[in-house]
């Protein structure tokens, strides 16, 4: 068997092996089985002797429901539910009803292996979701055919179909291409060729939307509370939306007027300025956040999600004030696996809706959103005479050519060439 076939079938082989019960040594008691079957109503059932750790694992699977009469957990017979159960109890002996073996779809296993490959390379959660969605769409395009039986011809046809028939943008087509190449290169270990003859969507050359200082002031002035602070940081420090929402208390240095942006786009750290205008309001906001955090701690909660599994190295760090979000949610979240409860940062859609409403109420006719504040930050700095390299560092651009796009905005209108109709 080739390495490619081995990679493709390894997960299925492992799933079948978990159904075999091996007799342990006589001095070690036999571990009770987790039984997976289907009841008369068509639901997937999971039964095992009482064990708090197993209950925590089963509750981590979406759609779980406890049946107190029959003493088992049940799930809707949806796509991939059997595989999720196997994954949760991967280190235990599981007995699966033979009629459910067909539910172990190779497609579901491939998608799971894509997720694992993305996570092992420390890509972002959004990249993982995007890659999985595109791989799933690619496989379904060919009626769930085995990806190992497909190659350059099928990939070309799929991506060309997107450009010709679905009229997707060039960036969308490139995103799909990256996901499929990742599948074959890092999951299936198969060479798909040079993809010659691929019809690429035309990439338009667009300029960023920039607001005037008066428009920025009008829009941000209609935001309230912590949303006003977020808007001021996006415009006053040039932060991206998620960089702002993921700020932690220790990332803000009031004495040096600096903000440390951790793990920004491209997994890069950078330092930008802390606007003097918002120092006092931000300090007042953090005092309120700290009072909420102390109340959570007094009630037995107060945990926060940690990066890079630091909570295992420093068990008390998730409760430390330094690691708390600058903009926490109003309601606490609960980890269904561990039972811990804490606060996540504000969800991006909440602020996006607030900005959309503010722009509308300010009578700004431009198509402006959260990222428009960052564009305006860069353009207004250029107008003030700051050099392009300084602005590149503040924005966190890898290449100065990315920052140069704002010079094209400057060359238009009243900041560049004077119209002859306006006289000499």
Image: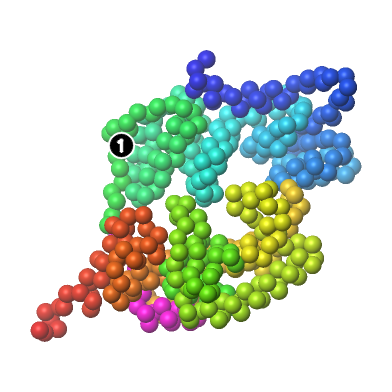
Magenta stretch containing residue 210, yes or no?
A: yes
Secondary-structure class at tag 1 = loop
Instruction: Evaluate whether residue 360 shows in this view.
Output: no
State the image quarter where residue 43 is shown.
Answer: top right
Residue 110 visible in the displayed image: yes
The image shows residue 411, relative to residue 108, as above or below, that is below
Write down the region rendered in magenta.
Answer: 206-222
> From what the image shows, is residue 214 above or below residue 102?
below
x, y (%) of residue 276?
47, 79
- Nearest the eye: 253 or 141: 253
The C terminus, quarter of image: bottom left
Which residue in the rendered view is the most extreme toward the bottom? 423
- Identify the residue shown where x is 55% and y is 65%: 251
Residue in front for this viewpoint, 315 or 86: 315
Q: Quadrant of residue 303?
A: bottom right
Q: Left or right: where does residue 223 sit relative to residue 209?
A: right
Q: Which residue is mark 1?
A: 198
The residue at the point 80 percent across, 42 percent down is 53
- The answer to whether residue 26 is left or right of residue 313 is right
Residue at the spot 17% in from the left edge and 74% down from the top edge? 417
Out of 263 and 221, give the one closest to the viewer: 263
Q: Write the residue at 59% across / 32% down.
A: 109
């Amino acid at each position: 068997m080739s390495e490619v076939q081995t990679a493709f079938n390894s997960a299925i082989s492992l799933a079948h092996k978990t159904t075999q019960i091996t007799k342990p040594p006589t001095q070690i008691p036999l571990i009770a089985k987790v039984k997976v079957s289907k009841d008369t109503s068509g639901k997937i059932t999971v039964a095992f002797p009482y064990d708090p750790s197993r209950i925590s694992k089963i509750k981590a699977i979406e759609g779980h429901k406890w049946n107190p009469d029959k003493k088992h957990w049940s799930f809707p017979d949806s796509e991939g539910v059997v595989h999720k159960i196997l994954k949760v109890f991967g280190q235990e002996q599981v007995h699966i009803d033979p009629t459910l073996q067909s539910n172990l779809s190779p497609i579901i296993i491939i998608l799971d292996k894509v997720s694992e490959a993305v996570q092992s390379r420390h890509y972002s959660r959004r990249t993982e979701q995007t890659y999985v969605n595109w791989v799933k769409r690619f496989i379904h395009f060919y009626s769930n055919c085995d990806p190992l039986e497909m190659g350059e011809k099928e990939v070309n046809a799929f991506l060309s179909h997107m450009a010709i028939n679905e009229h997707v943008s060039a960036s969308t087509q490139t995103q799909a291409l990256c996901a499929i190449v990742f599948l074959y290169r890092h999951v299936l270990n198969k060479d798909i060729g040079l993809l010659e003859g691929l019809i690429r969507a035309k990439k338009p050359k667009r300029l960023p939307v920039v607001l005037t200082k008066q428009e920025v002031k009008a829009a941000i002035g209609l935001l309230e509370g912590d949303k006003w602070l977020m808007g001021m940081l996006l415009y006053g420090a040039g932060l991206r939306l998620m960089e702002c929402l993921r700020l932690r208390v220790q990332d803000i240095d009031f004495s040096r007027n600096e903000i440390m942006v951790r793990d920004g786009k491209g997994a890069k750290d950078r330092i930008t300025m802390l606007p003097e205008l918002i120092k006092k309001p931000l300090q007042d906001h953090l005092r309120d956040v700290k009072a909420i955090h102390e109340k959570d701690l007094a009630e037995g909660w107060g945990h926060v999600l940690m990066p890079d599994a630091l909570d295992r190295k420093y068990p008390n760090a998730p409760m430390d004030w330094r690691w708390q979000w600058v903009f926490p949610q109003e309601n606490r979240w609960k980890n269904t696996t561990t039972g811990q409860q804490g606060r996540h940062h504000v969800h991006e859609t909440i602020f996006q809706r607030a900005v959309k409403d503010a722009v509308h109420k300010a009578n700004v006719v431009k198509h402006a959103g959260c990222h428009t504040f960052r564009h305006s930050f860069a353009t207004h700095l250029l107008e003030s005479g700051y050099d392009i390299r300084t602005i590149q560092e503040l924005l966190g651009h890898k290449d100065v050519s990315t920052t140069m796009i704002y010079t094209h905005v400057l060359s238009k209108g009243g900041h560049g060439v004077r119209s002859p109709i306006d006289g000499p």
